[in-house]
Amino acid sequence: MNIDWYIVLSALLFTIGAIGILVRRSPMVILLCLELMLNAGNLALVAFSREVGNGQGQVFALVVMVIAACEVVVGLGLIVAIFRRRLPLDVDDLRELRG
Amino acid sequence: MSATSWAWLVLLFPLLGSITIALGFRRTSWRFAGIVGTGAIALAFVCGIAALITLLGESPDARHHTSALWEYASVASLQIKLGIYVDPLSVFMILVVSGVSTLIHLYSFGYMQSDEGYHRFFSYLNFFVFSMLLLVLAGNFVLLIVGWAFVGFASYALISFWYRRTTATRAGIKAFVINVVGDIGLVLAAFLIFQQLGTFEYTEVFAKAPQVFHTNEWTVTAICLLLLVGAFAKSAQLPLHTWLPDAMEGPTPVSSLIHAATMVTAGVYLIARTHVLFVLAPTAADIAAFGGLATLLVAATIALVMTDLKRAIAYSTMSQIGYMIVGVSIGAYSAGLFHLMTHAFFKALLFMAAGSIIAAMANEQNIDKMSGFGKAMRFTSVTMLCGGLALAAFPFTAGFFSKDEILAYASARGGMYLIFTILGYFGALLTAIYTFRLIFRVLGGKPCAEAQELIDTGHGAHAEAPFNPATGETEDTDIGFPGAVHHFAEGSPPMKVAMGILAFLALFAGFIQVPGVDETITHFLDPVFADSPLAAIHPTTSASWFGLLIGGLISVAGVGIAYLLYVARPDTPRRLQERFAAVHTFLYNKWYFDEAIDILVVRPALAVGRFADNVFERIVIDGAITGGTEETVGRAGVIVRTFQNGIVRTYGLFLVFGAVGLALYFLIQQS
Amino acid sequence: MINALLWVPLAFGVVGLFLPRRAVGWWATAGAAVTLAIGVIMAFGFENGAAGLQDTVDTTWISGLGVNYSLGIDGLNLFLVLLTAVLWTGGIAFAAFRERDRPRLFFFLMLAAETGTLGSFLSQDLLLFVLFFDLMLVPFYFLFGAWGIDRTAEGGPTAARATLKMMIYTLIGSLLMLVGAIATAIVSAHGGHLTFSIEAIQHQGVPVGSQRWIFWFFAAAFLVKMPAFLVHGWMPDTYRAAPLSTLVVFSGVLAKVGAYGFLRIVLPLFPQATTQFQTVILLLALGSILYGSVMAFTQTNLRLIAGYSSVAQLGFITIGIFALRADGSDGAVLQMVNHGLVVAAIFIIIGILVERSGTEDLRSMGGMAMRAPVFAALFLIVALATLAMPGSANFVGEFYILNGLFESKIVFAFIAISAVAMSAYYALRLYIGTMHNRRPDGILSREIGLRDGIVLAPLVLCILGLALYPQLILHRADPSVQQSVSAATGSEGGTVVTTEGKAPELQVIR
């Protein structure tokens, strides 16, 4: 079985995610796109793991999933906090950290 | 007990007294402070006597001892012990210092009675005595410097005792800073001694010096000149004298104790103590002698025209110390130290009498406003007369024997040193005139209002409001000023006792050192100075008596001139003053020494300070160096800041570009 | 033991974050006091007369880089550690008596700073030293910035801006030092195994060519920290901005880290560069002395008088070290402790004065001794120690320093000693201007309270105790100092034979 297609798919997913982050302004969508990128990474990891023949890549994938879960928790929490303060849910307007 | 144990006790009592009084200032009465203070010094005096007796019990050659408590500051390369050195010279100084101090404490017990700062006064006074004793007992140069600086501090603290007078605090800081200049001289001298001889201990220094130094070698001359800076600053010799007249801002007992009897003579002690070095550096010794001579004459001329009673006596003190400096510098060690002792008696007495009169004048110090106290204050005026006679070296008083002994030695040494004899006698004439100018004007004549009030009511005068005698401005009557009630000798037994004893000593102390008869001091001090070739020079008894004859005549003549000027023809001084207005202004302004120092030292220093503050700090430090650093960092910050626009998506873009860039890099590397 | 000493303050600080607001001040004071107690116990266990490190801890931290967690005590840092512990106890107690907002964070930062400072004194590893050197600054950044005083009304900067200035300044210095430290390790390894241990590097030796530039990288950090003349620009603004209780420790201890760094690192590691640049550093230090003294007697702000006098004093300490003689450096070590005690006491006194008068301007003060004899007496003792009155330990320190300088560079000694007269003037001016003369309206003359008394009195007792027995420090410091100095001068023992004067003959006489 050729690994190429897995990699291509992973790259596609990753690009979609990245473009999504760059063009969308809703934090919700950005969060989803981030997930997409992470999972693209996971796909690649698992595929490589299969190719090489040991379990290391899969362990990495598990770690990434845990991190993704954490990230979602924090991210959603932030979004809820922003929503509660009645701030605009638009990342371009939330630029308090401008230097 | 050994002599050193007694000497340690001599140090201990005043220190304990000072601490006790200071710690107990809230709980104890003024009487307690006075008794403890006076008692502590009296005990020190008793211990000094004990040390003297112990020392006399030994053979003259063995009369020197060292003792150390602990290593004060010692490392591998240099050692400093907390040690003392006891020999006839230090015991002599102990006795003079603690003896006179006891009497002055007794005097202060009455004089300062109604002052709010009574505890503080006695604590400082005891601390001063401790420091002075430390100075004379120190066994090495470092401890000497410590004592030297301690007396300087005590002097400062007591000059600005009435610290809410701006004049007093200014005088205090002036005295302190000039004394620090002297300290620096001593410290540098100590460094040079250490560099050359590798030790600070007296015994080792004096033993090694003659082997290491050639006569008049530049190093030993430099050491002596540096020592002289210290000695001249402390002993108020030209040109470091300007603090002493201002020091009269302090309470009168302070002027009496510190600025007449003890501290200001420390320079004399120092030269006598380091005579080994001065013998090796005759040039430096001559410079010292001429410095003393110049001071002697300059101060005497200023004393002729001063109208402030205490300041006039202060200039007289400078002049008399000039005699002592001349004495110990040219080799008349025991004569110089003998004059130190008699001067302590009569000058302390004169200040006490002056204090008594100033108290009766409700703090007024201008002699133009005083007259007729001879009738108003019998006791004070009699004692003042005794002191005045001794100061004027009237025949058979204490000053008569001591002053002439120095001059006789100078003539015996001959050559260039005859100058000292001749000008010394001229100074003696001036001394007699200015002394009796004060006495005739203050004690004689028609009683002034205050004196009349004293005669009529028996009570001293009161000013309506307390005022500062230096500026005339009125003062608030809170803590830190002389009390409302003034005490003078007639109403205060302790003051009477102190003045009585001193009057006796001023008149008769000279008889312990009569040429050809007893010469007690010389015999006692001989072992100390035995190593100096100059000590071998001795005026013959007949020469001494011839000198005494001339001195007596000059003194009588001086008193006569003063009588003519101030009693017989009282308008002559005014006419002289008008005729020689320029001279009078010159003298009245104290030869413009203060102004010269102001222009040469104080103003440049302040100008440099202002320049540093306004120009250098602003432009170079804040502008160029700090500003430059800040500017660079700031500019860089502005550039970096443009990337930090707060839009998350921009950051994301950078991230992607970065990742792509990295990926491309690795790809290119691969291929 | 040494680990406890280092980490106890931080531990107390962390726990303090969870305590009620009222108690936290006392908790922090207790923490500092415990640290002090540990320090005192260690000092008692200190073996006198030994030059080497004692009480060492040495474990591998980052093995790949050769960085060790290595601590130790010797004659150089023993009393600086004690000084740190004493002053932090005093400074924290002084602060604990006063209300302030966000006390938990304040005291946490104070204690964290203590750990940082102790760490830089104790560490025997170059990288560990650099780390602590920077770490100790971080808490002060927040302390000064957040609790500081804005001077905008007087035309000065805000607290935050003044603090930023200090940070930029000192960070530039310490970044250079970081570069220098790494370079030292790499260069000295000569391609072999990398190590940051000071002792090992000293053993391996640093090539002379590299020493020249690395010397200046370290010197930059230390001179800024002191601060020395020309790089003291951050000092006036920072001193005016900082809260007084933090200034007690900042001025008392942190400045000493710079001087200590010279003795601990620069002299042993870069001996050739040290002798080569001796004159340059001496000139800078002389500049500090004269400039600091002159500025101190023209300033009217109390803090700045104390600040500039510190510049002058640190100048003295530097010339003591760079006299490159054991006695000069002995004096420098003694003087570091003395000056720390004195300047801390001065800042506490200034704090009390400012509370009574509501101003920091000397010209509008006066007459405060009237109802406050005890306070006046304590102040007087401190003022006299500041001006290095003979009889105080400060005098012994300066005496040693100047004696060392006198033996090696006589001209410098003559110039430096003139500053002593100036110090007499500015110290007394400070005392007289506040305590004596007439009392202007609106200034209280109130006796020192019991609470301030128990902070100030022990410091004064320390000053008095050292005055009686400076040997306490000199004796213990001397062997280590000799080791450091002889590393730089290449000669054994204390005496360095100079070419001037008659010094060579001296040996014969002795």
Image (cartoon, rainbow, N blue to C red):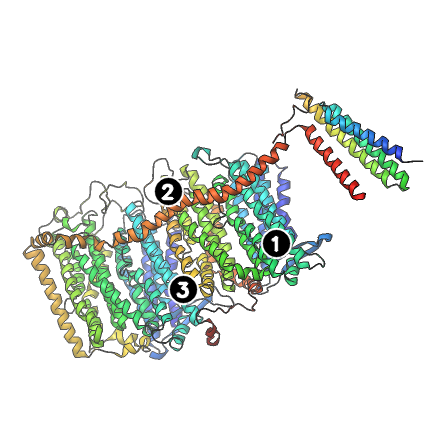
- Whether labels 2 and 3 share one chain: no
SS assignment at label 1 = helix
Q: Which is more foreground, mark 3 or mark 1?
A: 1
Side of B348 where C410 appears, left or right: right
Dot 1 corresponds to which residue? C122
* Disc 2 + disc 3, Cβ < 8 Å: no
- Quick one: label 3, few (<14), some, or many (20+) residues within 10 Å? many
Circle 2: residue type: Met
Reading the image, the residue beneath label 3 is B143
x then y, percent, for residue B615: 40, 44
Instruction: Name the front one of labels 2 and 3.
Output: 3
Q: Nearer the viewer, residue B563 or B325?
A: B325
Distance from Cα at disc 1 to Cα at disc 2: 42 Å
Report x, y in % for residue B315: 22, 58
Whether residue C434 is situated above or below residue B429 in the rendered picture: above
Residue of label 2: C368
Whether tag 1 and tag 2 are in contact, CB under 8 A, the answer is no
* Nearest to the observer: residue C479 or residue B552: C479
Image position of A35 with respect to C283: above or below: above
Residue C435, image x and y in percent? Answer: 37, 44
Circle 2 sits in a helix, a strand or a loop, which is it? loop
Chain for mark 1? Answer: C
